[in-house]
Image: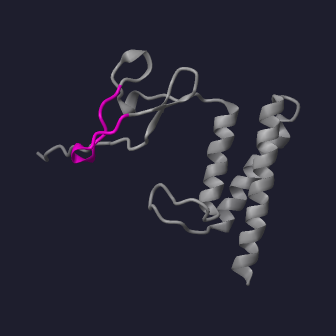
Amino acid sequence: MEEEQKFEVRDHRSFLLDESGEREAREKSSSEGEAKQGSAIGGEPFHPANETYPVNFSSFILSLATSALIHLGEEASPATGEKSVQLSMARQVIDLLTLLEEKTKGNLSKDEAGLISQLLFTLRMKFVEMEKLNHS
């Protein structure tokens, strides 16, 4: 019979979200570089597996935009820690955001509509810039 392998997941982020969605600083332990188990919402101990973030249209759009920025080489990949340019993947995410903008037109708040519009403008400009660099 094979031995069961154990693994540990450590959260190295330096903030938590409280009930209102505001960032709350999390204390870091200087001993052995591990984070202390601080208090989370309601005074209960913080456990990364139990952590929840608000799921709404804006957070969804921001996560997609972050994905596009990773594919454009603006941010490091969380998987590898390295930056790389994948224009076809970036184009796919930008097209998905465009589709969401079209399909949700008239159903978004002013802030949500402004957010997706501004994100798309920024991502499209960065895409064109990267496309020019790669063809030079």
Of 96 and 25, the residue lying toward us: 25
Left or right: where does residue 16 sit relative to residue 49?
right
In the displayed structure, would residue 6 be above or below residue 49? below
Looking at the image, the residue that sits furthest to the left is: 1
Rendered image coloring scheme: one colour
Q: Residue at x 62, y 50 (%)?
A: 66
Looking at the image, the residue that sits furthest to the right is: 106
110 magenta-colored: no
In the displayed structure, would residue 15 be above or below residue 91? above
Which portion, as a residue range, is magenta?
A: 27-38
Specify the quadrant that holds the N terminus. Answer: top left
Left or right: where does residue 30 sit relative to residue 86?
left
Q: Residue at x 14, y 47 (%)?
A: 2
In the displayed structure, would residue 42 be above or below residue 61? above
Looking at the image, the residue that sits furthest to the bottom is: 136
Q: Residue at x 65, y 64 (%)?
A: 72
Looking at the image, the residue that sits furthest to the top is: 42
| Count of numbered tags | 0
28 magenta-colored: yes
Give the image location of residue 37, x and y in percent: 30, 30
Quarter residue 105 falls in: top right
Q: Residue at x 73, y 49 (%)?
A: 96
Specify the quadrant that holds the C terminus. Answer: bottom right
Give the image location of residue 82, x and y in percent: 48, 65
Quarter residue 128 falls in: bottom right
Of 27 and 121, the residue lying toward us: 27
Give the image location of residue 73, x and y in percent: 60, 65
Q: Main secondary structure of the magenta part?
A: loop
Give the image location of residue 113, x and y in percent: 82, 37
